[in-house]
Image (cartoon, rainbow, N blue to C red):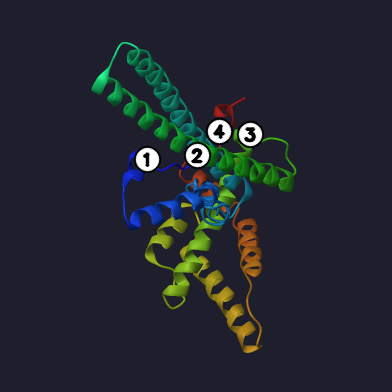
């Protein structure tokens, strides 16, 4: 609950009517503010933060976001607990103080309580954020037909993820560069074992399909792009492993995975 500092109520003249209006509306304002004690909306969390082309990589991102929010929540909780102890210390000190010392202690107590109240609202926002992410985590697990996620699951999907991400970025770059993949994404494609000329052919072919749809007075859809990316992940899934073998390496060492 938002409260005006007591001292500010001593203002006179036109400020009295403004203060009255503020106090009348403070409960509604406080309720409205509860909607925004989060770092960002669920839409941003789900569409911009968790935005990878494969489900398990999205699960990993969700876990990272939950851990970050939980760490912030833990830190805020312990800060509040310390402030509560300091408040009690000052309350004990008041008993043996008088005059200005006592008044200063009362102000310091009020200040710390205000800080606790503000931090508590952000803690509530963090709890709502974690709860929403857990819902998305469970939703993805259900979608891929798993009850839990292992390190091996994550490692095995990494090949598909990087193929999808490389083509996704290449398509976006090509749209901004006259249909050509930029140098950075050519490097990325090379690093994961995909020939840049083949990738350029795939991009050119896909952009041609979009042009054809436009000529037929039809519109390409995002679902169409995702279907195309999934097909490319299937088509090129073995390429990183082939490249790893050429380098004399294993793409995955199962003995080094968590049991």
Distance from the alpha carbon under mark 3 to that under mark 2: 35 Å
Does the image show residue 60? yes
Distance from the alpha carbon under mark 2 to that under mark 4: 46 Å
- Quadrant hosting residue 134: top right
| Rendered view: 67 above or below 224 | above
Mark with earlier residue (4, 3) = 3
Q: Which residue is mark 4?
A: 253
Residue 172 horizontal side relative to residue 108, left or right = right
Residue 201 horizontal side relative to residue 56, left or right = left
Distance from the alpha carbon under mark 4 to that under mark 3: 14 Å
Mark 2 or 4, closer to the camera: 2
Distance from the alpha carbon under mark 1 to that under mark 4: 63 Å
Mark with earlier residue (1, 2) = 1
Mark with earlier residue (3, 1) = 1
| Rendered view: 71 above or below 248 | above
Distance from the alpha carbon under mark 3 to that under mark 1: 53 Å
Viewport quadrant of the C terminus: top right
Distance from the alpha carbon under mark 1 to that under mark 2: 19 Å
Q: Position of residue 208 (x, y in %)?
A: 57, 80
Question: Mark 1 near mark 4, Cβ–Cβ under 8 Å?
Answer: no
Mark 1 or 4, closer to the camera: 1
* Number of other residues with Cα within 10 Å of mark 2, as a class: few under 14, some 14 to 19, many 20 or more: some
* Secondary structure of residue under mark 2: helix
* Numbered label attached to residue 150: 3
Mark with earlier residue (1, 4) = 1
Extreme residue in the top direction: 96
| Rendered view: 156 above or below 93 | below
Mark 3 or 2, closer to the camera: 2
* Number of other residues with Cα within 10 Å of mark 1, as a class: few under 14, some 14 to 19, many 20 or more: few
* Number of other residues with Cα within 10 Å of mark 3, as a class: few under 14, some 14 to 19, many 20 or more: few
Does the image show residue 249? no
Q: Position of residue 126 (x, y in %)?
A: 52, 39
């Amino acid at each position: 609950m938002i409260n005006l500092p007591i001292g500010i109520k001593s203002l006179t003249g036109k400020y009295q009517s403004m203060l009255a209006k503020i106090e009348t509306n403070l409960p509604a304002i406080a309720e409205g503010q509860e909607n925004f004690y989060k770092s960002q909306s669920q839409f941003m969390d789900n569409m911009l933060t968790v935005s990878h082309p494969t489900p398990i990589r999205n699960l990993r991102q969700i876990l990272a976001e939950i851990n970050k929010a939980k760490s912030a929540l833990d830190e805020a909780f312990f800060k509040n607990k310390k402030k509560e102890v300091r408040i009690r210390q000052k309350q004990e000190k008041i008993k043996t103080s008088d005059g200005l010392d006592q008044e200063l202690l009362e102000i310091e107590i009020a200040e710390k309580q205000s800080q606790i109240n503000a931090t508590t609202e952000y803690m509530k926002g963090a709890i709502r954020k974690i709860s929403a992410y857990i819902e998305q985590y469970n939703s993805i697990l259900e979608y891929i037909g798993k009850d839990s996620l292992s390190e091996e699951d994550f490692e095995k999907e990494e090949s598909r993820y990087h193929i999808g991400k490389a083509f996704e970025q290449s398509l976006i770059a090509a749209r901004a560069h006259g249909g050509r993949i930029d140098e950075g994404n050519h490097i990325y494609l090379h690093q994961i074992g995909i020939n840049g000329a083949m990738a350029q052919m795939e991009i050119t072919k896909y952009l041609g399909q979009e042009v054809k749809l436009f000529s037929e007075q039809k519109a390409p859809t995002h679902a169409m792009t995702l279907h195309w990316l999934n097909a490319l992940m299937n088509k090129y899934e073995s390429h990183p492993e082939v490249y790893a073998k050429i380098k004399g390496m294993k793409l995955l060492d199962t003995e080094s995975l968590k049991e």
